[in-house]
Amino acid sequence: MNYWLVKSEPFKYSWEKFNQDGRTFWDGVRNYQARNNLRDMKEGDLVLFYHSNEGKEVVGIAKVVKESYQDPTTTDPNWLVVELSPVETLKNPVTLATIKADEQLKDIGLVRRGRLSVIGLKREEFDRILELGS
């Protein structure tokens, strides 16, 4: 199993809206590295949901329920989506400031590659964020 983090601005697509929908395809990715990460996602992989710009915090856990396919919002074959479903809301959101201050998370992609919208995580990083959010 692989572990990921996806970012969404809450005013565009919030964790609350995602939970209401119950499932969504993750579209709008227009960065090649983020696209490659989408392509590498496998059904059952776990994904942290991060509110970017407003809040700047990990708020929940999702899972990949359908692997990558052509982004239906564009005719450009370079872009992909995956389908995600919410799993659990974190008891305590984990802020970017908390992540940056944690020695175990000093090399996490969220900090090193802050502008990337789909980021691979190590199992230890995923587990540490869950620990901080419990």
Image: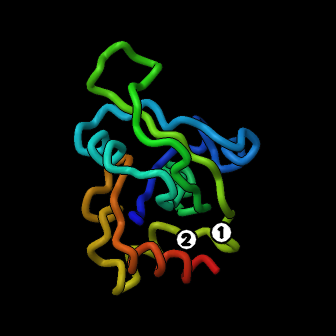
Kindly indicate the quadrant of the structure image that contains residue 71: top left
Q: Can residue 56 be seen in the rendering of this structure?
A: no
- The three-letter code of the residue at mark 1 reads Leu
Task: Report the residue at 36% width, 66% height from top.
Answer: 121
Kindly indicate the quadrant of the structure image that contains residue 32: top left
Task: Report the residue at 62% width, 48% height from top.
Answer: 85
| Badge 1: residue crowd in 10 Å (few <14, some 14–19, many ≥20) | some
The reply to whether the C-beta atoms of the residues labelled 2 and 1 are less than 8 Å apart is yes
- The three-letter code of the residue at mark 2 reads Val
- How was the colour assigned to the protein in this rendering? rainbow
Say which of marks 2 and 1 sits in front: 1
Name the residue that disc number 1 marks. Answer: 90
Task: Report the residue at 32% width, 43% height from top.
Answer: 39
Q: Secondary structure at mark 2?
A: strand
Name the residue that disc number 2 marks. Answer: 94
Q: For the image shown, how many numbered marks are present on the structure? A: 2
Q: Can residue 133 be seen in the rendering of this structure?
A: yes
